Amino acid sequence: MSRKLVLAAGQVARTATARVLLRGGVDEKTGEALTARVVAERVGWAADLVAGMAAGLLAGHWNAGDVARPAGGVDDAGRALPSNAWMALRRLGWAVRVPGGIKVNDRIVRMAQEQAGRILRGAQHRAEMVAGILATWPADPAKRTPAEWDAVRETIPEGRSLPSSVIKARTRQISAFLDEKGRLPVDVFDLEETPNAARMLVLAAVDRQQATLERAEDDPARALLRLQLPTRPDPHSYADWTWVACPITLPPTVPARAVLHLPTLRPTIGPGGGGRVHADLAFSHAVPKAKRKGHTTALGVDWGLNTLLSAGACHLHPDGTITALGAGAMFRAAGVMARQHRLRRHGEHLHAKTDSYERLIGGGEGHALVAKHAVLKAESRTPPSTARSAWSLCGTARPPTGPPHPAGNGRSAPTRTVAGRATATTAHGDASPPAA
């Protein structure tokens, strides 16, 4: 299958990622059907080999001089480094040491170099940020003055666009180091230990000699991933590596004409101790190129007074008429508000129980339920501010009670709200504004 996306006039490529689960496979050498647990075990053996080699490469180059070299973008001869991390490290002459007695092909070494190279490239930004914070260390790390904020942002590359929370987090990290060691760190490499290499297989760094991915001809929702995996945790020869074919069911978010790319495999431990392999599958598909003008459909999103987030779509007709597409939508953070809902239900239960006790007591001072009634009444009064905030937040999440009022002659339908997302059903289909 070709990995090149064919674009028509007025189209651009968009790349996204979908997570899929490997539910089993077939050993092509023996014809044996492999369960998901066996596939996860063999992927885990390969991932352990790659992570071990990547960790050794990171340990040997975790210093300011080496980290700056791949981030600089040029080699010793002044030539531009390749965009692929594994190719850049090879241009710099940074080799991977394969453990003694272990036999791996060059593609396994590529994955180790790719993973280590990405980590080393990303470390340069942290090194520059920590250096800028240390150079302008404030008198009170817990609270910088406006002048100290200006100084640290001027020292850090592109510090003006850096969120304050990131600088504060690094400052707290340095303060913890100062409290423990009694001195400021020299740089980020003194502040942090050598990073660990994750257990994963970055198949984007290999070619068809290690892994292939083909979409099924009769069903675009299915694909077949073939890759070489070890048959033992310590392969001693190439005979200990066999091809394994793993069928993949693509989620509906992957278009039928999208070009699939080799995924990144992440073996994990599932429920009950069984292994799982999640594949981060990248795909590219064609989308219309955004225009600066000439749009006929607009989506407006704004903070609301009675709702956390409100949105509405409008359509411009050739005669200049503007109609609303549906009744609009709202965002309700049901997951975030779960605690408030529990508090509200708990408070309602306490009030109902307290009222029941009051009816049973009937004003009698010597009733057996007087003591329990006092305890419940005190408990219901304990978190008044929390209860009020819960009720107020619940009030902001209620859907509108009045009928919608679309602009012009647009047709509308009731708004539906779901956890973390808002959708508005219209006569023209479903319009789903992105969740915040």
Image: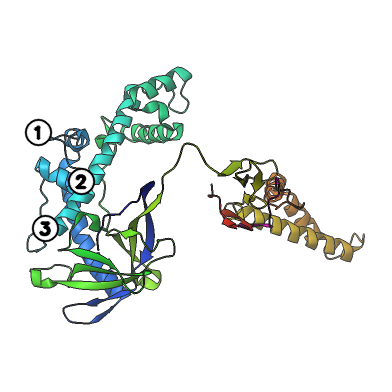
Of labels 3 and 2, earlier in sequence is: 2
Mark 3–mark 2 Cα distance, whole angstroms, equals: 15 Å
Q: Residue at x 70, y 53 (%)?
A: 399
Q: Is residue 418 magenta?
A: yes
Q: Amino acid at mark 1?
A: Asp
Image: magenta residue range: 407-419
Q: Nearer the viewer, residue 97 or 284?
A: 284
Q: Where is residue 100 drawn, in percent x and y? A: 7, 60
Q: Mark number for residue 85?
A: 2
Res 251 visible:
yes
Q: Nearer the viewer, residue 322 or 237?
A: 322
What secondary structure is found at the residue carrying circle 1?
loop
Mark 1–mark 3 Cα distance, whole angstroms, equals: 24 Å
User: Local crowd at mark 1 within 10 Å, few (<14), some, or many (≥20)?
Assistant: few
Q: Residue at x 44, y 64 (%)?
A: 252
Label 1 with label 3: CB-CB less than 8 Å: no
Up-down: is 57 above or below 413?
above
Which quadrant of the view contains residue 372? bottom right
User: Local crowd at mark 3 within 10 Å, few (<14), some, or many (≥20)?
Assistant: few
Mark 1–mark 2 Cα distance, whole angstroms, equals: 16 Å
Q: Nearer the viewer, residue 75 or 250?
A: 250
Of labels 1 and 2, earlier in sequence is: 1
Q: Where is residue 50 drawn, in percent x and y? A: 19, 57
What secondary structure is found at the residue carrying circle 3?
helix
Q: Mark number for residue 106?
A: 3
Residue at the spot of label 1 = 76
Of labels 1 and 3, earlier in sequence is: 1
Q: Residue at x 28, y 40 (%)?
A: 122
Side (left or right) of 30 relative to 318: left
Side (left or right) of 369 relative to 251: right
Q: Is residue 309 magenta?
A: no
